[in-house]
Amino acid sequence: MKRSKGEKIFGVFNGLILIILAIIALYPFIYVIVASFSDPMEVASGHVWLYPIGINLSAYEEVIHYEGIWVAYANTFFYAIVGTLVSIVVTILGAYPLSKKRLRGKTIFTFLIAFSMWFQAGMIPTYLNFKDLGLLDTRTAIIVGFCVTAFYLFIMRTYFTSLPDALEESAKLDGANDFQILLQIYLPLAIPSVVTLMLYYLVDRWNAYFWAMTLLKDESKIPLQVILNKLIVEGNWSEQTGALTDSVEYNQETLKYATIVVAIIPVLCVYPVLQKYFVKGMTVGAIKG
Amino acid sequence: MKIAVANKKGAGNKKSGVGIYFRELKRDLFRDKLLYLMFIPTALFFIFFVYRPIWGLQIAFRDYKVFSGLEGSEWIGFKNFIDFFSGPYFWRLIKNTFLISLYGLVFGFPVPIILALMFNEVRNKALKKFTQSSMYIPYFISAVIVAGLVTNFLSPSTGVINNMIAFFGGERQYFLSKPECFRAVYTLMNIWKTAGFNSIIYMAALTAIDAELYEAAVLDGANRWKQTWHVTLPCILPTIVMMLITNIGNMLNVGYETIILLYQPATYETADVINTYVYRTGLLDAQYSQAAAIGLFNGTIGLILVCGANYLSRRLTEYSLW
């Protein structure tokens, strides 16, 4: 299609504005990375903008030698991986029966699950419930207590519903039971949806902090996000780590930035995969909606 | 008419009618036993972690004492609610919750739509991919890290924003301790974090538009602006209305988890929303009944808003949540 002069000028402006917006989206990360490698004095005095000044790795040395962060890291990996697996298994097992029209009680089950999306008991009854069940300060609370997201369960159910009934009928004729049908026929077809939902759960689990902060008190169980809150938001490295050396005092800023870099590396590494599936998931959802 | 028939049938062989029902029920339950077995983990989760707390909401109507337990605490009716409504913070909390949501709607809602329209005009594939991928990234970063970025960047002594202000000859500001800045900071932060990613849903709507519509518009002599105005916008309007209604329904669910990270006593005046107040009253000060009542109030109004929004949505668009 031929474009008029005005349209070409518009196109250039449009592109420029988008590039500026993209830089705004990225700049915080660039700054954090650059600052974390710079001389703390240069960072504090505001000389560092775009490139590191006076390369200095002391912040990273400090972060790497602080054991608490690695314990938290290991915990986050545990909660994210085990949590996601538990979540996806329960979600698939819960969504499949609800996709069957013939299931007695389907309507009431669906309603009770949907209702939880629009009305929750709230913070206090939820907290007291964990307390009452004896789950305060346990890993079980984090893994099991938040294992199903109603919305994701419905996405899974919608997918199962979209598959033709004939699949099930022919397998039934061959004598397969419902478990076999789910595992051998429906699940292989649903792999793209399952992967998408696993990534949704994974990101939620990785980033979750509120209930971990509220329910876990034991330092050996807390995930990365909770310790990050103490280190970079409430922000006092020396208080948290108990290190009282001068080096920690004067490079507070760079320490925080180095901590942020260490914490977001895994997210940035898997970002291309995340982006691909999240975009697809959103798009499918939009067309369905 | 229908009732009459049913009555007649029921009166004729009532006993065997019920009998048939139960026999069929038993047969169906037996036939689908594996499906019910699969459903057990989900059912247990919802019973223990969703509906058990809802049952526990009765502490909102009791004077809950940790030692007496739920059942042992005295019933006090609506006292907790009345205390909250007549308390000093009620109007402040309502106002803050409402205003922070409204800021998000007015300033945050249009941004993803505009972004999607802009992405849509980009011809260069590499440029499109780069700008989109960059703007999706913040969505995947945790609230804690985003709050950490905000606090450190806004730090009056060493933060990069204040360094820039000082560089251009301005005066350093302690943004996060100024009540008048909080809502702006919070809203801008949310736009930065979510606008790019939220544009995806509009991009999906844009790609679904039939190319023939544009061809027809071009034949009628419409330029790009006119095409956007007369073809693109009307085509994505249902998506816009749907998103708007969903957002209005969720107005009370202000992101308290993030606010807790960013506010401080100096900014409570503008930053304290219902849920952050519930957090302080209940989880920090252990006034469980009082806090549960406020939470229940918030949840109920929220439910009404969602139902209202859904009703509107069904009337205005073909989309509805149920």
Image (spheres, grey):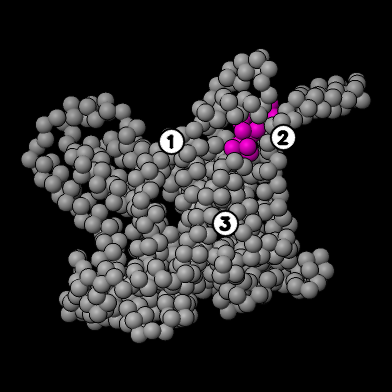
Can see residue A108?
Answer: yes
Residue nearest the viewer, comparing A104 with A69: A69
Q: Rounded to the nearest whole Å, what is the CA distance between mark 1 and mark 2?
A: 29 Å
Q: Rounded to the nearest whole Å, what is the CA distance between mark 2 and mark 3?
A: 32 Å
Disc 1 marks a residue whose amino acid type is Val
Q: Is residue A82 left or right of residue B143?
A: right
Residue nearest the viewer, comparing B253 with B316: B253
Q: Secondary structure at mark 3?
A: helix
Q: Could you tell me which chain the residue with mark 3 belongs to? A: B
Q: Rounded to the nearest whole Å, what is the CA distance between mark 1 and mark 3?
A: 27 Å
Q: Which segment is the magenta one?
A: A92-103
Q: Nearer the viewer, mark 1 or mark 3?
A: 1
The residue under label 2 is B36
Q: Identify the disc placed on residue A284.
A: 1
Question: Residue sitting at 68 percent across and 24 percent down?
Answer: A177
Question: Residue sitting at 47 percent across and 77 percent down?
Answer: A240
